[in-house]
Every structure is written in C-alpha cells, then in structure tokens.
Image (spheres, grey):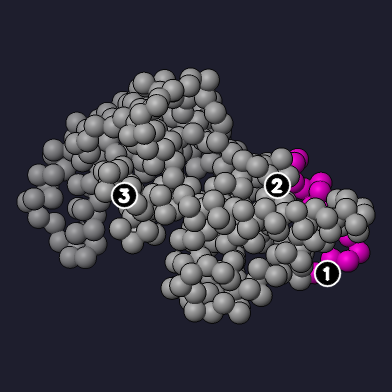
Amino acid sequence: MNVNKMCSVCGHNKGVGRNYCAITCESCKMFFKRTALKNQTFDCPSGGKCKINAITRKLCTKCRIEKCCAVGMRKELLKSYGLVDVDREYNTSTNESSPQSAQSDDNNCHEIDILLENTINTSAEELMDQIRDIENYVTNNIFVASDKQLPQMPVIPVFRELIDYKGLNQLECNRMRELMTASDVFKRYELGKNIVKSKDKDVVTKLFMPRTEAHIRDVINFTKGLKAFVNVCPDDQLALIKYSFMEVGYVYPEWERDPIILELLTAIIIFNPKHPDLSHRASIKLEQQIYIYLLRKYLQLKCRSQFESELRLQTLMNSMTDLKIAGDLHREDEINEYHNYKPYYGPLLKELYGL
C-alpha cells in the first residue's frame, strides 16, 4: 500500500500526515482544529463551487471546511484529542493518576478505535511497506522541500546573471537574496472560472474584505523577513505597514511579469520616509535608497543601456508618487465608510486604521 504524499484537502506536499482520520498537511490540520467546532455560518463568494488548493485554500472558509469533512476528517475526534492533551499535561506536572483521568480514558475508547480501525486489518508485510514509504518520503522531503517552495524558473536564471554582474558586491547580493526569500510569502492567486457579478457595494465589500485581511497578513510576514525592518522601532514598523499595504496590493498585478522589479518596488514602497507618524525618517530613507540603488543596478543589467535604464528608473519612481496618491484616497474612503461596513472589516484592518 503506497502512502498518499499529497494533502487530500489542498494537494500540498509538505508536512503531510494522518490527521483526524484523513491524510492532510499541517496547515489544513490546524485550520480544521480551529474551525470545525465553531458555531458559525460561513459564506462562499461562488456558491460553494470554489476550487481548494494550496494557493486558494485561505480564500474561502466554507468550501475548505466542507472539503475537510468530505475527505474524512472527523469533528468528534477534536474533543477527544483535547482531552488527551490535557491529561498528558496534568500527568506531567503532578505525576499522579486520578479517577477523572481514568474516566476520560474510558470515554475516549470509541475515538481511539476509529483511529486504529484501518491499522489492525493491515498485514505485517503491508505495514512494513508503509513504513518504508514514509521513511523514503521524509528523507526526500528534507532535501527537496525548500526547492519546491519557490517558483524557480522565472527568477533564478535572472538572479544568477545579477550575481555575476561585475558591479554587484557580496553585500548587495546578500540583500537581494534576503529580499527574494522574504517575497515568497506573496502567493500568485489563481482566478477561478466562476465569476460573480454584483453592483451591490455591500456584497462586493463583504467578499473583498477576507482577501484584504490575507493581503495584510502577507505584507506583515514579508517585512519579518527583512532585517532592516526588524531593526526599526515598533511604532515605525506599524506606521510603515499601515501606510504601505494598500500600495503594495496595487503594484503586484502590474509588475507580476518581472518578479525582481516587483520585489524591489515592494521594499521601496514600504520603506517610504514620507509616511506619517515616523520617528526615525533618516534611517528609513537610507533603507529605501539602498533598494532604489539595487533597482538601478538590475535595470542596467536588464537593459544593457545606461540611458534606457535611467529612463525606466525615472518612470518607475514617478509611478510611485501616483501610487501613493491612489493609496491615500482609498484609505481615506475606507475610513469614512467604516460605520456603514463595520461588520465586514477584519481585525488587522481595524487595528491598522485605528478603528
């Protein structure tokens, strides 16, 4: 019997194991644990027709939890796992057994039987085959997991040329590597074939806000991968994210065709010393100038012409000004209409806007 190496919910191939009677990844396991027992009704923007995969799994809670149940994940095991964890914690701290723990063990017998039902009917030979498959899978994953996480072909050949460029020193190469690693948090969301058309602003806002929350989370995780950002004081970190996440969302669809320009522009947008409420503008301006400098070097490599590279750099910098104006207008509009759409705003958006 071969071990299923793909998550049966989203198809991801990292951290896969048997969780709540189904083969899933760690992300879907934790999602099921957080969501399955909630007494809450979820909405689906496509009427229950979402395609759940490793990229789209965060976009629709309703379809994801339904698929978890469809592939065999059992809600009744959630409570039993919790009791087992509590008992283990209690026994570790006191080293004593009690009638209550014995009673909880009796109550869990049915759930334990469910977990073992697929194992007791397996022959010794089949069991050894499964163990070998698991060992081979884990061993292979140790070496190739990091390679599978990144879309290599669009980025690495160009980056190798950039490293080999005679004007780029080791410090600059390290900055580029750090930036490209941090940028992996931004996923390229695939558009589904189903299209929802609506002229009702309430409906559009309701469907759009979960995506906004996910985008803010991506921006926060991106900044955590930049040492320069981590060294900024907490108040300035909050201000940089607050006044840049909207512009980052605008720039991604426009420059997705060139990942290196996209990643450099993202850093330039975030390290903007003109953002309000900043305490250390000089150090932030220095970081922005470093990324502008790296962008200039990349354009020189790509264009092979000093005149053309400088012209394109100037065009990009001018577009940043327009982008900032558009972001400020969007932000002001959302704050003004907050009271009309308060139920749809997520916790991250509320915190950033101080609502």
Q: Is residue 131 above or below residue 266?
A: above
- Of the two numbered discs 2 and 3 on the same chain, state the one appearing first in sequence: 2
Q: Amino acid at mark 1?
A: Asn
Q: Amino acid at mark 2?
A: Pro
Q: Quadrant of residue 123?
A: top left
Query: Would you say 237 lies left or right of 41 here?
Result: right
Front: mark 1 or 2? 2
What is the secondary structure assignment of the residue under circle 2? helix
Q: Is residue 196 above or below residue 148?
A: above
The residue at which mark 2 appears reads as 259
What is the secondary structure assignment of the residue under circle 1? loop
Q: Position of residue 2 (x, y in %)?
A: 53, 25
What span is colored magenta in the figure? 153-170
Is residue 108 a member of the stretch shown in magenta?
Answer: no
Contact flag, marks 1 and 2 (Cβ < 8 Å):
no
The residue at which mark 3 appears reads as 338
Query: Would you say 123 lies left or right of 355 here?
Result: right
Q: Quadrant of residue 324?
A: bottom right
